[in-house]
Image (spheres, helix red, strand yellow):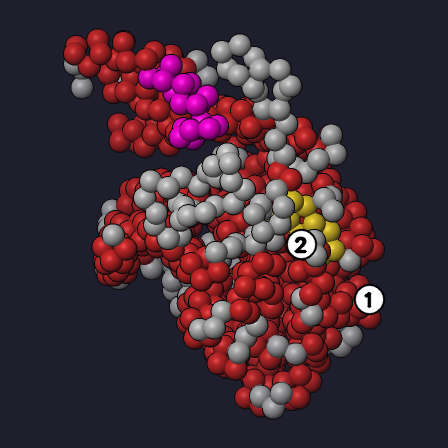
């Protein structure tokens, strides 16, 4: 399971960066989304994966005696997902507005006001 | 898109989904669920309604624009966090009622925080989706 | 000990923002509520500062959960100083924007969003938890995205795409760094991280993680290789918004960097070299970029980058003197950069342009206003005894002590370039005769006297604050020395947070 996730993270990061380097605005956004998902899975992996072990201490014990699923990474991922939900919906509407103004998906056409860069 | 099947199904699904979203909201404290998921389910119910009947009917059904839900929910969540501060405890400390209420059980400030999140999520999600679909119609 | 006062500056802005959304369509009411909110925040943050100064450090465990498990809010002198500076700059921008921001922007919730931005900044300064810092960062950048694109036309949108893309990338890098750090240590509390990172045996892994943090914060604060989003976006929004961005947003990145590189990671020789190299290149690129610009706002955008180099350089030197100087520089820079963009806003109102080829003759027409702006410019350049001068002495001295002569040369050259750029700008905008133009639009004189006053008062106020920073430098020096002491000896912070 861990190895699968490692490959998945690598795939998400590399494809995200590849898409970001393209000229298209939509691909830039898709790349950012993939990168974000890669980061989320990375957090998940970093919290050590334990299947079917809820982090609840039994009534007759005072500390954890065996491996348990760490709840912190899950709450971090949840927070990160909610944040990226907001960011992405904003970015989609922004792209739409920009497309309506420039009639182009090409990032190179966005430099009309860069007279003296 | 006008489909009789979708319209009829929506008539039954809308109340069911709303009820389910409240169920998820209340279930959230000890089991999986909570304000965010509940709010998403509730907003999906309204999105379904807008698919079946069109955006205007849904906006009429909601009475207030979804944007106006946001400050109400924010204020509720904010107040539930501030409440323990009046008792000299830290911000966001859980305050619980001493007696369990019928059906719902013990009521704590966390519930009101979640209800606030529920309302904010409905407001935000519907605002986003309505904005996108309005701009498509243009 | 839990002290709820800590979170009140954040709440002042949150509550104001909520009230502002309720008052969505009443613009005049929004103006009043917003000003009241900024004022309350200033009072609360001053109170917080005085209490922190007396007690040394205040902590609040949110939800009553003990330190390494819950989210801790910490106000040490460093945080409290920044909260006060944010409140001062926020109040000034708030007053300025009641007149300068267009009605269309106000109708789309300009005030509410700007208060959310202020809330995020205060949160980022006060939190003691690294993931919480990420969340506050996101609140700030989402608000800044909205402010930048609000009722925007083509230039704003074009700038916004670059700004949004780079900042989202920076957040992802920051999140990745947090993930790896959590995997290494199993904690997110900064005080606890400080203890656990020191125990890790694989030092290379720690260095790599710290550099990931450097990349994340570096993009946000426009450090050398990844600065280009700043000059192509900061000149597009209206002056009030650009003032908030230029004065506070990049400094938030520097603040986060200073926190992580003094509390969580103690830079090793390699990291120090990376920081210093980036600082030198930032100083050069910023200064060179500003040289050939014709729009003053673009010029100032590059100067922001250039001056970030001073702070990163000082952080890279990592001695007591250097850190104190960096803190002093940050205090001076927040006030002066905010004021700079506000002053540019007034020039834009008067002449309807920020292009130096179309400006001129301001000194003849408005001698008093020119004198006021001269204070800002001279403070930024660092003519003694104004505020920019004092931190530079500390930086020069510590780079001499550490034998980083290239950094010293870069500091001195960047200072000269700043002087040259400001001198050129002064002679073009203020002394040169006004070039003949077909249309003569002076929005400033068309405004009623009350509104003119509202535009000028914040500039005067901030200029007075920067004069105080310069002339009362010994008081600021006491503050920054204390902050630097706490940065080098973190035991104080750890004891307070972890209740040892």
Label 2 sits on a secondary structure element that is: helix
Task: Tell me residue B71's x, y (percent).
Answer: 54, 27
Q: Is residue B77 above or below residue C10?
A: above
Principal secondary structure, stretch drawn in magenta: helix
Task: Tell me residue B79's x, y (percent).
Answer: 63, 28
Label 1 sits on a secondary structure element that is: helix
Residue projecting furthest to the front: A60
Q: Is residue C261 above or below residue C123?
A: below
Residue B36 numbered tag: none
Give the quadrant of residue C251.
Answer: bottom right
Task: Tell me residue B74's x, y (percent).
Answer: 55, 29
Q: Which residue is mark 2?
A: C497
Badge 2 and badge 1 in a common chain: yes
With B138 as the anchor, is B125 left or right in this view? right
Q: Which residue is mark 1?
A: C475
Highlighted magenta segment, given as a residue range: B17-36
Disc 1 crowd, CA 10 A, few/some/many (<14, 14-19, 20+) = few
Q: How many marks?
A: 2
Q: Residue at x 65, y 37 (%)?
A: B91
């Amino acid at each position: 399971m861990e190895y699968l996730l490692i490959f998945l993270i690598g795939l998400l990061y590399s494809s995200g960066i590849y898409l970001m380097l393209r000229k298209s605005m939509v691909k830039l956004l898709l790349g950012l989304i993939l990168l974000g998902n890669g980061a989320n899975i990375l957090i998940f992996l970093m919290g050590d994966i334990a299947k079917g072990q809820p982090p609840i201490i039994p009534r007759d014990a005072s500390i954890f005696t065996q491996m348990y699923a760490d709840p912190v990474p899950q709450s971090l991922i949840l927070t990160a997902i909610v944040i990226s939900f907001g960011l992405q919906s904003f970015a989609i509407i922004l792209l739409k507005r920009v497309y309506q103004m420039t009639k182009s998906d090409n990032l190179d056409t966005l430099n009309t006001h860069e007279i003296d860069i | 898109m006008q489909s009789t099947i979708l319209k009829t199904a929506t008539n039954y699904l809308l109340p069911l989904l709303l009820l389910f979203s409240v169920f998820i909201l209340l279930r959230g404290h000890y089991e999986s669920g909570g304000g965010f998921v509940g709010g998403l389910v509730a907003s999906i119910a309204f999105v379904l309604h807008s698919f079946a009947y069109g955006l205007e009917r849904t906006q009429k059904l909601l009475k207030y624009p979804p944007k106006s839900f946001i400050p109400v929910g924010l204020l509720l969540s904010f107040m539930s966090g501030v409440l323990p501060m009046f008792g000299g405890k830290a911000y966001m400390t859980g305050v619980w009622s001493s007696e369990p209420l019928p059906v719902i059980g013990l009521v704590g400030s966390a519930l009101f925080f979640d209800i606030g999140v529920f309302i904010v999520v409905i407001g935000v999600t519907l605002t986003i989706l309505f904005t996108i679909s309005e701009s498509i119609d243009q | 000990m839990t002290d709820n006062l800590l979170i009140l500056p954040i709440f002042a802005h949150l509550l104001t923002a909520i009230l502002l959304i309720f008052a969505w369509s009443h613009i005049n009411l929004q103006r009043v509520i917003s000003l009241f909110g900024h004022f309350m925040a200033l009072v609360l943050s001053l109170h917080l500062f005085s209490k922190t100064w007396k007690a040394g450090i205040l902590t609040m465990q949110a939800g009553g959960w003990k330190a390494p498990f819950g989210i801790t809010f910490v106000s040490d002198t460093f945080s409290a100083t920044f909260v006060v500076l944010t409140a001062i700059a926020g109040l000034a921008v708030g007053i300025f924007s009641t007149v300068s921001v267009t009605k269309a922007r106000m109708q789309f919730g300009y005030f509410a969003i700007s208060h959310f931005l202020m809330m995020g900044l205060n949160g980022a300064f006060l939190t003691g938890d690294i993931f919480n810092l990420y969340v506050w960062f996101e609140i700030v950048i989402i608000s800044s995205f909205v402010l930048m694109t609000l009722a925007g036309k083509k230039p704003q949108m074009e700038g916004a795409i670059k700004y949004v893309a780079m900042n989202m990338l920076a957040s992802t890098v920051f999140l990745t760094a947090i993930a790896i750090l959590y995997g290494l240590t199993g904690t997110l509390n900064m005080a606890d991280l400080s203890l656990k990172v020191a125990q890790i045996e694989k030092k290379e892994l720690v260095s790599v993680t710290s550099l990931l943090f450097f990349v994340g914060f570096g993009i946000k604060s426009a450090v050398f290789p990844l600065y280009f989003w700043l000059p192509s976006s900061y000149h597009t929004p209206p002056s009030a918004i650009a003032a908030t961005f230029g004065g506070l947003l990049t400094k938030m990145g520097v603040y986060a960097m200073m926190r992580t590189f003094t509390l969580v990671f103690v830079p090793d020789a390699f990291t120090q070299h990376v920081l210093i190299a980036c600082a030198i290149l930032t100083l050069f690129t910023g200064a060179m970029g500003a040289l050939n610009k014709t729009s003053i706002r673009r010029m100032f955008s590059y100067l922001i980058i250039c001056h970030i180099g001073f702070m990163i350089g000082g952080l890279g030197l990592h001695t007591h003197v250097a850190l104190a100087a960096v803190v002093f520089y940050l205090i001076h820079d927040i006030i002066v950069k905010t004021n700079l963009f506000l002053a540019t806003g007034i020039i834009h109102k008067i002449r309807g342009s920020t292009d130096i080829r179309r400006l001129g003759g301001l000194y003849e027409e408005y001698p008093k206003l020119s004198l006021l702006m001269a204070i800002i410019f001279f403070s930024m350049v660092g003519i003694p005894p104004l505020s920019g001068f004092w931190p530079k002495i500390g930086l020069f001295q510590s780079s001499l002590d550490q034998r980083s002569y290239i950094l010293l040369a870069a500091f001195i050259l960047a200072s000269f370039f700043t002087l040259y750029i400001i001198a050129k700008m002064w002679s073009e905008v203020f002394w040169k005769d006004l070039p003949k133009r077909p249309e003569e639009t002076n929005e400033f004189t068309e405004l009623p006297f009350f509104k003119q006053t509202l535009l000028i008062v914040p500039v005067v106020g901030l200029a007075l604050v920067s004069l105080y920073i310069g002339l009362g430098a010994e008081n600021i020096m006491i503050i920054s020395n204390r902050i630097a002491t706490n940065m080098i000896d973190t035991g104080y912070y750890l004891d307070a947070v972890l209740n040892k």
